[in-house]
Amino acid sequence: MKFEKFNEIFDFPVCFFGSLDGVLIAYDQDEDHRVDIFVSRMRKKHKKDLFAVGERKGCLYLIWRGNFPIPESLTNDQQVQIGHDSWTVYQSETLYAAILRAKPCPFSSQI
């Protein structure tokens, strides 16, 4: 199965999918399950709004369900501790914004 649209949304080659606590998890070829630790340790109020997460080379890609303020601690360029490692939030955006970025709509300026 090919995941071209997900590759565009996550901006890295998605090879595997999983889910945890209602959050879609996109894995690259390394299938680094430390991203599961990130999801499992998230605050419930943030986790319920998270649609999907991916990890690539120490960078997190977060896609949120709604059009609401993204938690400040999980915006672009923020550092997140996972065990002894520090990962960077590379991309944190709503699902709507991710879809528009992946395939721009000709009428997006009118939306």
Image: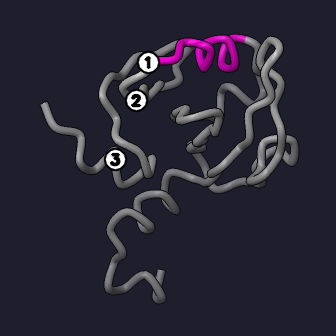
Q: Which residue is mark 1?
A: 31
Amino acid under disc 3: Asn
Give neighbour class at mark 1: few <14, some 14-19, many 20+ (Cα, 10 Å): some
> Does 32 appear in magenta?
yes
Instruction: Tell me the SS state at disc 2.
Output: loop
Residue 2 in the image, given as x and y percentages of width and height: 16, 37
Residue 33 in the image, given as x and y percentages of width and height: 54, 12
Q: Which residue is mark 3?
A: 7
Real-space CA distance between mark 1 and mark 3, rounded to the nearest whole angstrom: 15 Å
Q: Nearer the viewer, residue 101 or 14?
A: 14
Instruction: Tell me the SS state at disc 3.
Output: helix
Amino acid under disc 2: Asp
Q: Earlier in the sequence, mark 2 or mark 3?
A: 3
Q: Which residue corresponds to the image point at 76% horizontal and 20% vertical from the top-left?
A: 42
**In this picture, is 69 found above or below 27?**
below
Instruction: Tell me the SS state at disc 1.
Output: loop
Q: Which residue is mark 2?
A: 28
Q: Which label lies toward us, 2 or 3?
A: 2
Q: Which residue corresponds to the image point at 86% horizontal and 41% vertical from the top-left?
A: 73
Q: Nearer the viewer, residue 47 or 31?
A: 31
Asked where in the image residue 63 lies, by quadrant, the reply is: top right
Which residues are drawn in magenta? Answer: 31-40
